[in-house]
């Protein structure tokens, strides 16, 4: 059962069964919660992103066996805001929303069937809380493209002080976030390289956080001269955080994000590009002496990388498919002693907790996000700056999707993930609508909002913020 607990973030199954919170951490969280309720909607995400950047997962309050870390407590403030201010709006669920709902339901039902215990069900509720609590909070607070661009700016501003604190961590060898219960109070050293982690659980996740935000900052640069200083500082800060973590994974994540951005001139040929990639992978699988996923074993950007371990995990997941495909598995020991308790692959982790169905539904969320972005790109009536910003979110999604081959998010990175999904869901829903029967001149002046039959129109189209 230890293999299950190692990556758990649910309510019930937690190795720590008592509250651990200090006055400073609780006070900071309550302050962010008050701001979340009091600030105007356009700035409501500031305290959420701030807590994500500067609070660890090491502090939690246990109530009747339910574990509430500081992010979950802040989510309560967020939903209190929605109720008090009447900001819960009727949502016509789009394809992304539906995929997330089905994925969550699958995870809860199948994992509960696997364990046959109330503890397992309670634990699954924790994952539901994370997914619904954050994703739909963001969906209600982000209305249009102005709000999307504002998130880019907020993230750009807050990553600058985070980078400065991580530089301090590298210079002193001590983690300033230890006061908030950081997992690593002393900087890790692997093969002579200092690996800082800041408020995150491990250095790789700290670097991943910075790398997956990089496309946001590049998109901000493209919005005009007014934002280029902030964008430049944010890009520099992302690079600084990557340097302080000294981890191969985040460097590759950043490269993938940049590659996604550089594909913009060839965006019309993405279908052909996907076929080429598929044929190349098949060819490598045939030519190589080992399966194609062992390409991961050859990646070693920074000394001390564990690419072989990640490739071996995929290999073992394939070899033991018959043991986990239906409901998942109670123990990761089926993958071998070298893997037991260390599932560094989100897709495999989904299979561990809910079998093939849950894994496929998780992938479906990603596919539908890419599909929504592709539909926007196919619409020539959407302003070019809008399409570039949405493409940047696609590059961030691409970075997450590739990164999931080498790590599973077990810290506050899940907030970053659900925020991106909500931004894509909202942005692709309001960027275009079904054309209305209007005079030609008027139709050109008012691009519509929505995607196909399943589009969600959350607010009137507003292109003022994307220039």
Image (spheres, helix red, strand yellow):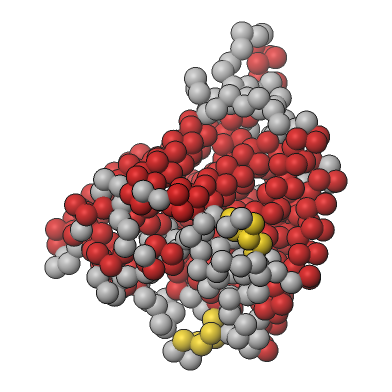
Answer above or below: position of 422 versus 194: above
Expressed as whole percent of the image width and height from the top left, the position of residue 323 reads 22, 54
Counting labels gives: 0
Answer above or below: position of 371 versus 320: above
Answer above or below: position of 100 versus 196: above
Residue plotted at (45% across, 73% down): 248
Expressed as whole percent of the image width and height from the top left, the position of residue 11 reads 54, 55
Task: Specify whether 284 is left or right of 224.
Answer: left
* The quarter of the displayed image where residue 81 is located: top right
Residue plotted at (50% across, 23% down): 454
Answer above or below: position of 190 versus 426: below
399, 356: nearer the viewer: 356
178, 121: nearer the viewer: 121
121, 408: nearer the viewer: 121
Residue plotted at (69% across, 54% down): 73
Expressed as whole percent of the image width and height from the top left, the position of residue 109 reads 40, 41
Task: Specify whether 304 is left or right of 66.
Answer: left
In which quadrant of the rendered image does the N terminus lie?
A: bottom left
Expressed as whole percent of the image width and height from the top left, the position of residue 395 reads 51, 50
In which quadrant of the rendered image does the C terminus lie?
A: top right
């Amino acid at each position: 059962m230890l293999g299950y607990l190692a990556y758990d973030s649910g309510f019930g199954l937690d190795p720590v069964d008592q509250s651990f919170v200090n006055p400073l951490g609780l006070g900071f969280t309550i302050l962010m919660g008050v701001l979340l309720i009091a600030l105007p909607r356009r700035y409501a995400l500031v305290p959420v992103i701030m807590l994500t950047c500067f609070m660890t997962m090491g502090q939690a309050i246990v109530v009747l066996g339910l574990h509430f870390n500081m992010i979950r407590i802040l989510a309560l403030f967020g939903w209190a805001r929605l109720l008090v201010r009447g900001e819960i709006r009727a949502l016509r669920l789009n394809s992304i929303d539906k995929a997330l709902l089905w994925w969550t339901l699958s995870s809860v039902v199948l994992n509960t069937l696997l364990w046959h215990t109330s503890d397992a069900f309670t634990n699954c509720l924790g994952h539901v809380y994370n997914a619904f609590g954050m994703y739909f909070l963001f969906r209600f607070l982000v209305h249009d493209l102005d709000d999307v661009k504002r998130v880019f700016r907020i993230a750009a501003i807050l990553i600058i002080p985070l980078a400065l604190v991580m530089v301090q961590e590298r210079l002193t060898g001590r983690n300033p976030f230890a006061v908030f219960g950081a997992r690593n109070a002393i900087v890790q050293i692997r093969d002579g390289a200092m690996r800082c982690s800041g408020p995150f659980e491990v250095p790789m996740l700290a670097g991943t956080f910075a790398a997956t935000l990089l496309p946001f900052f590049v998109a901000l640069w493209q919005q005009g001269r007014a934002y280029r200083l902030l964008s430049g500082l944010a890009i520099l800060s992302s690079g600084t955080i990557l340097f302080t973590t000294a981890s191969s994974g985040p460097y590759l994540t950043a490269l993938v994000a940049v590659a996604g951005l550089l594909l913009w001139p060839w965006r019309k040929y993405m279908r052909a590009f996907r076929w080429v990639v598929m044929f190349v992978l098949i060819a490598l699988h045939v030519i190589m002496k080992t399966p194609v996923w062992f390409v991961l074993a050859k990646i070693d950007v920074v000394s001390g990388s564990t690419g072989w371990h990640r490739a071996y995990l995929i290999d073992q997941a394939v070899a033991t498919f018959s043991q986990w495909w239906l409901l998942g598995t109670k123990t990761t020991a089926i993958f071998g002693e070298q893997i037991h308790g260390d599932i560094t692959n989100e897709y495999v982790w989904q299979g561990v907790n809910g079998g093939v169905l849950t894994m496929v539904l998780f992938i479906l969320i990603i596919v539908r996000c890419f599909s929504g972005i592709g539909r926007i790109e196919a619409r020539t009536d959407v302003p070019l700056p809008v399409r570039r910003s949405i493409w940047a979110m696609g590059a961030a999604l691409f970075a997450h999707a590739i990164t999931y081959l080498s790590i599973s998010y077990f810290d506050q990175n899940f907030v970053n993930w659900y925020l991106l999904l909500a931004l894509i869901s909202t942005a692709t829903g309001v960027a275009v609508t079904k054309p209305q029967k209007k005079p030609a001149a008027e139709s050109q002046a008012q691009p519509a909002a929505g995607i196909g039959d399943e589009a969600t129109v959350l607010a009137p189209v507003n292109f003022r913020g994307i220039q």
